[in-house]
Image (spheres, rainbow, N blue to C red):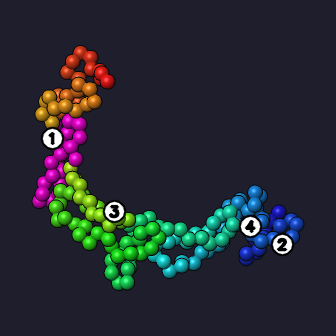
Amino acid sequence: MRYLFGFLCVCALGVMPMAGCGENGGDDGRLCDGVVCPPDGNECTLEYCYYKAGTCESGRVADGKECDFDGLAGVCIQGVCAEYPCQDGDDGDLCTWDSCDYISGTCNFGPRCISSGCRVGWCDPADGSCSFTAAPDGTSCGDCHEVCINGACECPLPICFCVP
C-alpha cells in the first residue's frame, strides 16, 4: 500500500524517497502524478516528469522550431537557440521547395512538381501550382522492359522479365 505526500511516498514499510516506492524500483508510472515541471527558460527544451524517478527532466525539441535569438529570428538546433543559419533560404522561385539543413546551414532547393513513372509534372511559375500529364508512349518507366502506354507503366511484350 502506497500513498503520495509531496515528494515522499509512504509505503507499507515506512517513509521512503519516491524512487523507491514503485514495484521494480519506482517505475510504475504513478510517481509523476501531480508533478508539475517548471520551464527552464530555454525555448529549445521541453520539461517533463521522468516516470521512473518522479523527477523533472529536460529534453530537446525538434531541430527547426522557431525561437527568439536575442531579438532576431532564430531556430532551435540541438537544444540551443541559434541565429537562423539559412539567411538566403528563399530562392524566389515558386516552383521549388525551399528547405534548410539546420546543422550544416545549407539551403536546399528542390522541384515542387516531381515527375514519376508515367506522370510528368509541370509547375506554373506564376503561382507554384502543379499539373501532371501522361508521359509519351514508349517512355521507359520500369526496372525491366516496361514502357509508358496511355499513361500507365506496362510491359508491351507477352512476358516481361529482368535478366541480371
Q: Is there CB contact under 8 Å for labels 4 and 1? A: no
Q: CA distance from mark 3 to mark 4?
A: 41 Å
Which contiguous range is marked in magenta?
114-134
6 falls in the magenta region: no
* Vertical side of 53 occupied by 135: above or below: above
What's the residue at 77%, 58% (across, down)?
Answer: 23
Q: Which is closer to the viewer, label 3 or label 2?
A: 3
Q: Which mark is residue 133?
A: 1
Q: Which is closer to the viewer, label 2 or label 4?
A: 4
Q: CA distance from mark 2 to mark 4?
A: 12 Å
Between discs 3 and 4, the one toward the N terminus? 4
Q: CA distance from mark 3 to mark 2?
A: 51 Å
Residue 130 at x, y percent in the picture? 18, 51
Categorize mark 4 by other alpha carbons within 10 Å: few (<14), some (14-19), many (20+): many
Between discs 2 and 1, the one toward the N terminus? 2
Nearest the viewer among 5 and 48 is 48
